[in-house]
Image (cartoon, rainbow, N blue to C red):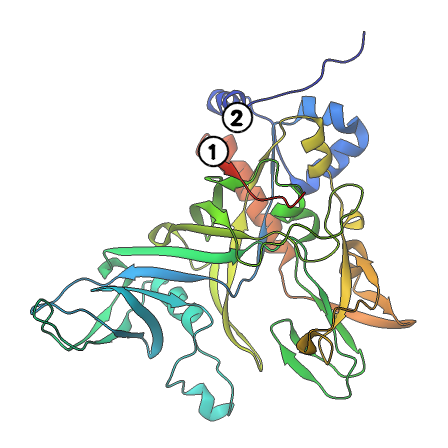
Amino acid sequence: MGKKKIEKTYEEINTKIKSGKAVVVTAEEMIDIVRKEGREGAAAKVDIVTTGTFAPMCSSGMFFNFGQMTPTIKASKVWLNKVPAYAGLAAVDAYIGVTEPAEDDPLNKIYPGEFRYGGGHVIEQLLKGEKVLLEAKAYGTDCYAARKMKKEIALSDLSYAMLCNPRNGYQNYNCAINLSDKAVYTYMGMLKPRCRNANYCSAGALSPLLNDPLYKTIGVGTRIFLGGGYGYVTWQGTQHNPAVPRTPGGVPVKPAGTLMVQGDLKQMSPEWLRGVSIQGYGSSMAVGLGIPIPVLNAEMAGFTGVSDRDIITQVIDYGHDYTNGIARSYGEVNYEELQSGEITVNGKKVKTVPLSSRVKAREIATLLKKEINRGNFYLNKPAELLPNGY
């Protein structure tokens, strides 16, 4: 007789977590297990695979409510430490984006034309327990007579603070080079002229969506590690584009899926949400994100056994092509090659530079593994899976 086909449910896996019998491994650990045991053997042995990524995620920000005053105010313009927040929501609700630059950034005097301080730094300061200056202006109405507010606030003073990121956890991304004769400064970092460096931004085999490439388990309501606390996938992210070429294993060979995520900022940590300044580009925020992948069957075991060698991306010129909308690849490279520190482009050896932290991604996957083993983290079955485009 053949081996029994493995099929598990979320309920069965959660029961194992509760009893302390769930087998949890990180995505890196799963590679060897699948290699040795095969897909069916790995599915029988492992219940959950934890993933992680830590990198700048520009499409991030915070919804917050800063409380009323007397007389009441309906804010139409809001600033936190001189960083504008969007106030077209309700009386004292606003949203601050991590790439929004300060209107009065003292560093601009040192680095003319550059915005070094922005929304990502404000969020990190709040998480550190520091106070920031809130300023609000209003046009005044009969029910909201006040026209301005100014006070220092800490995160504890906010009645509501939610991290809400419209596009995180990109499923694969470009390897960026610069073929022009001058240095260019991009969201992928500084790219030296004449292809003297190649920058990339992905946790590779640890990256969440690369371990569930066809979105079989990740969807609306998936519980995740977010910024040092817990959060949820709330929808597909902006620019979600699953209909791209893929390897036989389902892995996209160019940027594809994205996630919209959110969670209670007051439960998070500045260790996993850090304001960053990217030279010549502006401010952003490095976000720590981790997702547990349930090994429901042999197919999922195969997906979570993906290695860096299996993940391919495109080499794209940001010196001319990218800004001019030219979709041209200068070759394909895998993440094993990228992480080696050197790739070959047009016959030339080029040094590679990661914008994401593999060390922090590994730490997130390990933390998530420990939390599940302690019975502190259970899986949520998605209410709806992400659009898959096929």
Tally the numbered discs.
Answer: 2
Front-lying residue, 276 or 57: 57
Instruction: Name the side, left or right, on which 64 lies relative to 97.
Output: left
Most extreme residue toward the right is: 347
Residue 147 drawn at (x, y percent): 14, 77
Q: Secondary structure at mark 2?
A: helix
x and y, in percent, of residue 343 in the image:
84, 65
- Label 2 sits on what residue type? Tyr
Question: Which is more toward the observer, 258 or 133?
Answer: 258
Query: Tag 1 or tag 2, which sits nearer the N-term?
Result: 2
> Is the Cβ of the residue at disc 2 closer than 8 Å to that at disc 1?
yes
Secondary structure state at the residue bearing disc 1:
loop
Residue with the mark numbered 1: 380
What residue did someone put label 2 on? 10
Q: Residues within 10 Å of mark 2 (few under 14, many from 20)?
A: some
Q: Is residue 254 above or below residue 218?
A: below
Front residue of this view, candidates 291 and 95:
95
